[in-house]
Image (tube, rainbow, N blue to C red):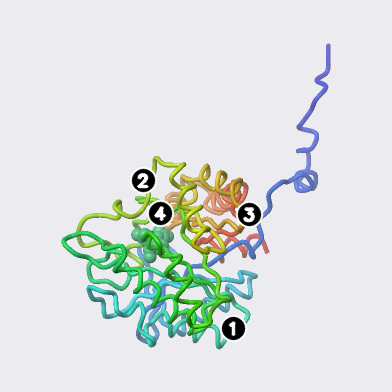
Amino acid sequence: MAFPIHRPRRLRRTSALREMVRETTLAPSNFIYPLFVVEGRDVRRPIASMPGIFNLSLEHALAEARQAYALGVKSVILFGIPDHKDARGSQAYAREGIVQRAVRELKNALPELIVIVDVCLCEYTDHGHCGVIEGGHVLNDDTLPLLAQMAVTCAQAGADIIAPSDMMDGRVAAIRSALDEVSLTDVPIMAYAAKYASGFYGPFREAAQSTPQFGDRRGYQMDPGNVREALREVDLDLEEGADMVMVKPALSYLDIIRVVRDRVDVPVVAYNVSGEYSMVKAAAQNGWIDGDRLMLEILTSIKRAGAEQIITYHALEASKLLG
Ligand code: PBG
């Protein structure tokens, strides 16, 4: 009988061999950990749809960031949830706003931690949209100065990276020139460049209390069927001065991560969003899947698709397993 000439199984025989030939590996330094910061003291409120994730007041956010840093997760992304919301999201760009205070507190206590701020109005507006509203429509150009002001106040508070997630046209340019004008020329912009109008953000909106009170976000976030449009968004953000680009969500958009990675020379980030996290948790709680195993497989697939950095709610548990 003829023997097979090629036997790929030879290199799969032992765990050491498999490790030797593994093409994609995960490390805690690949993860960015999201924190939902709320006002008040001693708040550590569980988010029902995201087991293990909490709304945190400042001292608890700091404790969580410390834990992340100790595990090798060197960066966090902050979402501020103010008590007071209004039509123009004024707490988003208040000097003493919750997210500005959180930045100061974290940078004070952990100067080496990379603190990223999600710049958007939806957590701060009473209508839950990402910009200023007129006649049921989000006004693009009227929103830009508010986003720029939010970026400036956060950078002045010490934020290391500004991450606009609003999907208004021209916001990267508006933020870049506002930062430059106040001499914050060295603060990078991580643009949510290809951000889709996705059902996977459901649990986040519980966490951030940012569900739109009318309509949806399809008028500014991208249509899930589009690839070329994602490339155009990425090109525009880079032209406007973005230093890194993001694809969001991650899991149903691995093809987008790949084409973006192949096209640009800047770092590519992917957001493993709330619904992706909740699906794993729910199925694991039912005993239908092995949650840890799926978590690592999903994170590996996102990195394999081309993302160097992954924003993920799994950051701490994955780092513990990898440790
Ligand atoms: C907007 C923002 C959202 C997410 C990150 N930034 C919500 C949205 O666009 O509706 C979603 C993240 C997630 O689902 O984990 N500030």
Secondary structure beneath label 4: helix
Disc 4, ligand 1: is the CB inside 8 Å? yes
Looking at numbered disc 3 in the image, what kind of residue is underneath it? Asp
Q: Nearer the viewer, residue 247 or 27?
A: 247
Q: Taking the image as drawn, is residue 49 in sight?
A: no
Q: Are marks 3 and 4 in contact (CB under 8 Å)?
A: no
Secondary structure beneath label 2: loop
Nearest to N terminus: mark 3 or mark 1: 1
Left/right of residue 259 with respect to residue 126 in the rendered view: right
Q: Are marks 4 and 2 in contact (CB under 8 Å)?
A: no
Mark 1 residue crowding within 10 angstroms, few (<14) / some (14–19) / many (20+): some
Q: Nearer the viewer, residue 230 or 295?
A: 230
Looking at numbered disc 1 in the image, what kind of residue is underneath it? Leu
Which one is closest to the eye, mark 3 or mark 1?
Answer: 3
Quadrant including the C terminus? bottom right
Residue under label 1: 110
